[in-house]
Image: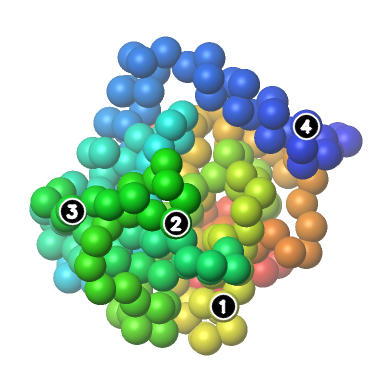
Amino acid sequence: MCARAKDQARKDFLRLRRELTAEDRAEAAQGLARVGLQGVQQRVPRGGTVAGYLSVGSEPGMDALLPGLVKAGYRVVVPVCEPEWQLSWCDWTPETELVPGMHGSLLEPAGQRYAASDLPELGLVLVPALAADSAGGRMGKGGGYYDRFLARLRADGNPAAAVAVVFEHEYVPVGTFETTSLDAPVDAVLTPEAWRAVPSEHMYT
């Protein structure tokens, strides 16, 4: 299989997302909540910390999964964009106040910010993606925020599994899209239908 160049692959996956109906998105959000909560409960002790994110636009909806994690007794943190493409983290619950972030169109939680090193109990990272392949390759939106964050997390010795969150059709065979050594691999892929561990020579779990 000939891997599609990143720019073209991003355009293709974004086009397919735009074609999803409101019903498609609602069903996917419920599937992610059901499968995602079960997957987290099997891997992270109750009371542990899960890094999630606030979905926007055409991203798979996290509106049911994140409240479900909080209700189940997990500490949920979500990212805040910092200068130089870095991420910090804030606690999140359904009552958390959201304010405009560094990128004005994105709302982020108000409150104390934490570096990954401030979260030693971090058990799992849910990572947004446009697509993920069967070898752990992940396609992001091109900013590199999560690639930098995961690289720093590993350098600090934190083994928390990274789990790409995508629609079912965005879980694809290895070689579907181009990846490079700068693209941090993931350890599993969460879709509305399944939680799949993915083989990778860079496995961290």
Query: Which mark sits nearer the N-terminus, 2 or 4?
Result: 4
- In the displayed structure, 109 sits above or below 153; it is above
Q: Say left or right for 193 vs 164.
A: left
Query: Which mark sits nearer the N-terminus, 2 or 3?
Result: 3
Q: Tell me whether the residue at label 2 lies in contact with that at label 4, contact meaning CB atoms closer than 8 angstroms.
A: no
Query: Which mark sits nearer the N-terminus, 1 or 2?
Result: 2
**Which quarter of the rendering shows the N terminus?**
top right
- In the displayed structure, 169 sits above or below 108; it is above
**Mark 2 closeness class: few <14, some 14–19, many ≥20 residues within 10 Å:** few
CA distance separating discs 3 and 4: 37 Å
* Dot 4 amino acid type: Gln
Position in image of residue 75 (x %, y %): 21, 66
Q: Which residue is mark 2?
A: 102
Q: Secondary structure at mark 4?
A: helix
CA distance separating discs 2 and 3: 16 Å
Q: Which residue is mark 4?
A: 8
Q: Nearer the viewer, residue 153 or 102?
A: 102
- In the displayed structure, 105 sits above or below 152; it is above
Q: Nearer the viewer, residue 56 or 31?
A: 56
Q: Secondary structure at mark 2?
A: loop
Query: Which mark sits nearer the N-terminus, 3 or 1?
Result: 3
Q: Which residue is mark 3?
A: 97
Q: Secondary structure at mark 1?
A: helix
Q: Which residue is mark 1?
A: 152
CA distance separating discs 2 and 4: 28 Å
Judging from the image, the colouring scheme is: rainbow
Query: Which mark sits nearer the N-terminus, 4 or 1?
Result: 4
**Mark 4 closeness class: few <14, some 14–19, many ≥20 residues within 10 Å:** few
